[in-house]
Amino acid sequence: MNDADSCRCDDMTARILRFCEAHDVKIVAAESLTGGLLADAFVRVPGASRVFLGSAVTYDLSLIHISE
């Protein structure tokens, strides 16, 4: 990801957080192979804790149960 992509991602994340705050919506996440990238994107934005409650990251495939 280059600097321009990073800026667009930060802008989009800030917009999502503002929208959620305006509509009294909270965000929680369960991440796996992203390794916490979603949480990282949210917590980069000042004030994110008003909306983003946290994320659980399970990275190892042996801990992830996928039913077919």
Image: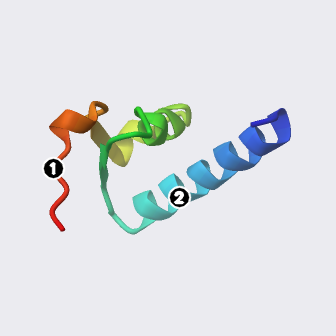
Q: How many marks?
A: 2
Q: Nearer the viewer, residue 2 or 21?
A: 2
In the image, taking residue 57 as reference, residue 16 lies left or right, namely right
Give the mark nearer the N terminus: 2 vs 1.
2
Element under label 2?
A: helix
Quarter of the image where the N terminus is located: top right
Percent from the top left, x then y, of residue 46? Answer: 53, 33
- x and y, in percent, of residue 33 in the image: 40, 39
Residue positioned 37% across, 37% down in the render = 49
Task: Give the label on residue 41, or none.
Answer: none
* Left or right for 40, reference 66: right
In the rendered image, which residue does mark 1 sit on?
A: 65
Residue at (58%, 50%) from the top-left corner? 13
Q: Is residue 65 above or below residue 61?
A: below
Distance CA(mark 2)–CA(mark 1) = 29 Å
| Circle 1 Cα neighbour tier, 10 Å, few/some/many (<14 / 14–19 / ≥20) | few
**In front of the other: 37 or 13:** 37
Residue at point 33% right, 62% down?
25
Q: Secondary structure at mark 1?
A: loop
Q: Quadrant for residue 59, please give it.
A: top left
Residue 24 lies in quadrant: bottom left
Residue in the image at 36% along x and 43% along y: 50
Lateral position of residue 66 relative to residue 31, left or right: left
What amino acid type should be assigned to the residue bearing mark 1? His
- Which kind of residue does numbered mark 2 sit on? Ile
Q: Residues within 10 Å of mark 2 (few under 14, many from 20)?
A: some
Query: Where residue 68 appears, x then y in whole percent?
Result: 18, 68
Give me the disc on residue 16.
Answer: 2
Display colour scheme: rainbow
Q: Which mark lies nearer to you, 2 or 1? A: 1
Q: Give above or below for 57 relative to 20.
A: above
